[in-house]
Image (cartoon, rainbow, N blue to C red):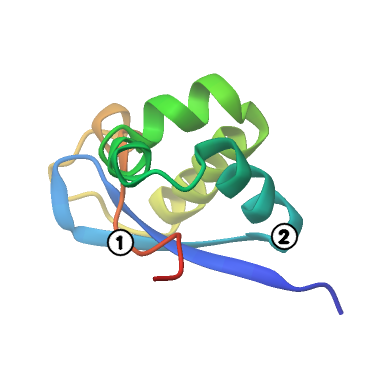
């Protein structure tokens, strides 16, 4: 069985909407290697998560958007725009301390 890594994303401007995304561990390791060990680089990664993923890891960005679409199709939006919900933010730990 392949090892995986799970992380949380927040959707749009609704901090109460969170999704768990699961990726293969080798993808996690490639992203970690890309970011490096520097504390500022790691802060930047967390702060600009969607932009970094879109630019450097488009397949992961596509996977995240598919997960968001799946969530949207299962839930009543109650005033949230689908476009807004596709703005995602990083909400968990990526690196071991």
Q: Nearer the viewer, residue 12 or 27?
A: 27
Most distant residue in the top direction = 55
Observer able to see residue 63? no
Report the side of 54 relative to 60 (left or right): left
Marks 2 and 1, Cα distance to the nearest angstrom? Answer: 20 Å
Observer able to see residue 68? yes
Q: Give residue 18's mark.
A: 1
Q: Give residue 31's mark.
A: none
Q: Give residue 24's mark.
A: 2
Q: Determine the secondary structure under disc 1.
A: strand
Q: Nearer the viewer, residue 94 or 63?
A: 94
The image quarter in which residue 84 lies:
top left
Report the side of 25 relative to 16 (left or right): right
| Quarter occupied by the N terminus | bottom right
Residue depicted at x 24% and y 59%:
17
Of circles 2 and 1, the one toward us is 2
User: For the residue carrying disc 2, how many other residues have a C-alpha within 10 Å: few (<14), some (14-19), or many (20+)?
Assistant: few
Q: How many marks?
A: 2
Q: Determine the secondary structure under disc 2.
A: strand
């Amino acid at each position: 069985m392949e090892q995986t890594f799970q992380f949380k994303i927040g959707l749009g401007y609704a901090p109460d909407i969170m999704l768990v995304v699961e990726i293969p561990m080798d993808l996690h390791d490639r992203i970690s290697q890309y970011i490096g060990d520097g504390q500022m680089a790691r802060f930047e990664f967390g702060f600009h998560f969607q932009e970094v993923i879109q630019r450097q890891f488009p397949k992961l960005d596509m996977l995240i958007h598919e997960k968001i679409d799946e969530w949207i199709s299962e839930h009543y939006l109650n005033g949230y725009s689908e476009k807004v919900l596709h703005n995602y933010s990083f909400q968990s730990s990526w690196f071991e301390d």
